[in-house]
Image (spheres, rainbow, N blue to C red):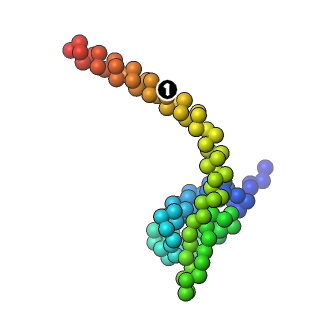
Amino acid sequence: MARAATTTDAFNAVAEPRRREILAILAEGERTVTELVDALGLVQPLVSKHLRVLREVGLVSVREEGRRRVYSMDGRPLKAVHDWVKGFEQTWNRRFDLLDGVLEELKTEEEGNEDRE
């Protein structure tokens, strides 16, 4: 089975950890490529490659500011990712509820042991 192109949608674009790091940085505010390179500790061509992919799916936009290119994040394409992940919320909540029950039993058991000592 052929691997899907990374530029088809936000799911593929954010599957790469460095792209998620770039988005996290841009979520705090606009940055130039140089600032992203410094923050990530990567070489400029690699950061530019990731920015290109993020731009192609609409997660990042760029504007010219003199000789600098300033990048910003557009979170709208992430809504599809959010909506998909949200579908698993009930599963997580059930598991957390089960964990809460186990922790409460352990706490009650520990308090019972302390009372007997």
Residue sitting at x 64%, y 53%? 79
> On the rendered structure, is 15 left or right of 41?
right
Asked if 5 appears above or below 43 in the picture, the reply is above
Asked if 87 appears above or below 1 in the picture, the reply is above
User: Disc 1 marks which residue?
Assistant: 98
Count of marks placed on residues: 1
Q: Nearer the viewer, residue 72 or 35?
A: 72
Q: What residue type is labelled 1?
A: Leu
Q: Which of 9 and 30 is in front in this view?
A: 30
Residue 29 picture location, percent across and down: 49, 68
Residue 9 visible (yes or no): yes
Residue sitting at x 54%, y 29%? 94
Specify the farthest residue to the right. 1
Residue 1 picture location, percent across and down: 78, 49
Which quadrant of the view contains residue 109? top left
Quarter placement of the C terminus: top left
Specify the farthest residue to the bottom. 66
Residue sitting at x 39%, y 20%? 105
Which quadrant of the view contains residue 73? bottom right
Task: Name the element at disc 1.
Answer: helix
